[in-house]
Amino acid sequence: MKNLKIWFAFFLAGVFLTSCQPEDYSMGEKLDPSEIDYEIIQDYDIDAGGNTVILKFNTPGATPVWNYGTGKSSRVVDTVRFAFQGDYEIDLNVITAGGVVDLDPVTISVTEDNLSYVDDPLWTKLTGGNGESKTWVLDLDEEGTSIHFVGPLYFYGTDNGWLEGGGEWDGGATGCYEEGGDCWNWSPEWSGNTWLMPAGDYGSMTFSLEGGPYVTVNHNMLPSLGEQSGTFFLDKDAHMINLNNDVEILHSVNNDECVNDWSNVRVMSLTEDTMQLGVLRRDDCDGAALLVYNFVSEEFKENYVPEEVEPTIDEGFDPEFESGELLQMLTGGPSSGRIWELDAEGNPVDWIASGIGWTENADSSRDWGWNAGWDEAAADSWIRFDQWGGMNYTRYQNGMETSGTFSINEETNEITLVNNTLIQGPEGHWMNPTTHVIKVIKAYDDFQSRGIWFGTSYNADSDEWLAFHYILGGNEGNGDGEGTTEPIALNFDNSKLAIGDIEENGNLRLELFNEYGSTMDDPGLTRSDVAFSEKVEITFSLSGITLNEDAAGSYDAKIYFADGDWAPQGDGNVITVNGDGTYTVTYEAPSPAQGTFVFVIDVVGLAADLADMDAVSANIEEIIMY
């Protein structure tokens, strides 16, 4: 009766508003029960046992509310099919302009079972099948564990509904009942949103087809509801479940007062092991929405065995190098050198246990591991490995430079620094390396942007390495930590130069390299050779330029550059291009650059003014790095 009273209250409010006209204050006439014309017909031609019952309401200007034991209806003509034999009481309440008219119940007798009415896959999934029962529980336990869903409660728009085959709504047509309607979905993970409901044993909900469609709900977390029993009806076409006798689905106390009807629920998804049931939250409780409670079958929960997930070893852990490859990575090759700096602005240190690290940045172990002293030590330090007359290293720290030789054990990836350690942090700090031998723990093919992890100590009990993350700094270097002052020429194969209106924006582009362009797979330069501390200059020539009659004739040209980790990146200095000729453009780096993602020259607007793009050719004359 609670829902009927709410319905009637809204009805009366509507009557009142529409009747507020001058000199007319009447609510209307309340009909006498004798004036209500209706029929309840058992169709024995369809079912010899009288299972099919036709409800007809023939009274104009009034609205029926049928309650036939296994469900409710407000249709003028409706057909009810009872699967099980027995006596059924049919109640009819009629909403009239003057109020609600209660009629005496009518009892009908069904003399035979017709189980075809519950012989449907959805009925079977819900109940276990004819003569069976199935118990469902909320997918949350006392420990806060959900075994199938990421949490026990999801949120959907008010026009969302059945999701064919189960699963979460993906924004498509399936699961949205009205085109352009209120359709959305939020599926919060309980562990990060414990405000959804407290962890606990919420009880159980059993749907049975043992002699009838019966439902029993035990509300462990809502003592005011306790144990409830009644009948139910599953509308397999509308994907609705109606619980009778004021039975409510399992739910949390924090939403109890925000839902008017816990007995008529939308089936959002239903499988052999999982079920999602939605109820409408009122607009005055944080906005109208479907609260969708997630259930798993008791059998599924009792037999659930957590999947053993093999730990994912960090990418690059325990790398394998070809002969000479590690030396090439460290130094850049014969007669070359590379500066490596501690990744203080990123993730400088980690404890890599069984191949799995855990730190994300310096703050992951702030103070008890990484601290202000390490910030200071890393800010002005580097180590250079080179092959200038042998295998040498130079360590620069706190204004002091120490040098020596190093060797590599290619079987173990160990690097021995003769008479030195990798770095010296705050005095007496436990992370300070104490050995001359460091081990490459992790390395990558794209080391130019991702660096190398050097392990400095190992704990066999925990299979754990203390490792420092080094990234490329300036180029070859001269011992002062600022890189070499001698300019370096970068080799470039002009047969690999891409030229044209590549971005289709009217600019003439000379693409030396672009991670996202045609030069990615076959570049004209070696990415790791791109290294400069101050600036890079490109001298290029253009020929075959013929301009349209209305062309501007003068165009801005500049380098756009991004190094191997996008810092530094940006536009170079602007020069003027006005036709065939040789030009020089410059990019000044705000910080040392190592490697490249994008290395192009753009002549702004020139492509749009060309009479014949195919006639234009370009050549990279020289690339000088400082």
Image: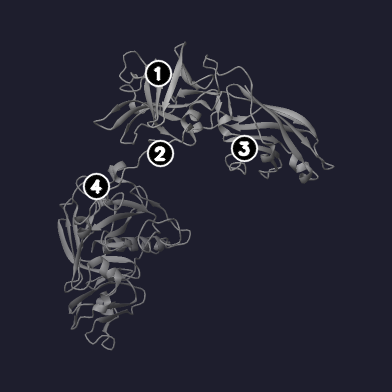
Q: Which numbered disc flags the more N-terminal residue, 2 or 4?
A: 4
Q: Amino acid at mark 4?
A: Thr
- The amino acid type found where label 3 is placed reads Phe
**Residue 558, position in %: x, y?**
68, 31
Q: Is residue 37 above or below residue 577?
A: below
- Work out whether mark 2 precedes mark 1 in sequence or the reverse, and give the earlier one: 2
Disc with the residue nearer the chain's start (3 vs 4)? 4
Quarter of the image containing the C terminus?
top right
Q: Nearer the viewer, mark 2 or mark 4?
A: 2
* Helix, strand or loop under label 3: strand
Q: Check residue 256 in the rendering and tell me which mark sits there, or answer none.
A: none
Residue identifier under label 3: 513
Label 2 Cα crowd, 10 Å radius (few <14 / some 14-19 / many 20+): few
Residue 100 appears in the picture as rendered: no
Mark 2 or mark 3: whose residue is earlier in sequence: 2
* Side of 553 relative to 275 (left or right): right
Dot 2 amino acid type: Glu
Mark 3 vs mark 1, CA separation in Å:
35 Å
Mark pair 1, 4: CA separation: 45 Å
Q: Which residue, given by chain and number where applicable, does mark 1 sit on?
A: 423
Disc sitting over residue 145 in the figure: 4
Helix or strand or loop: what does disc 4 sit on? loop
The residue that disc 2 covers is 315
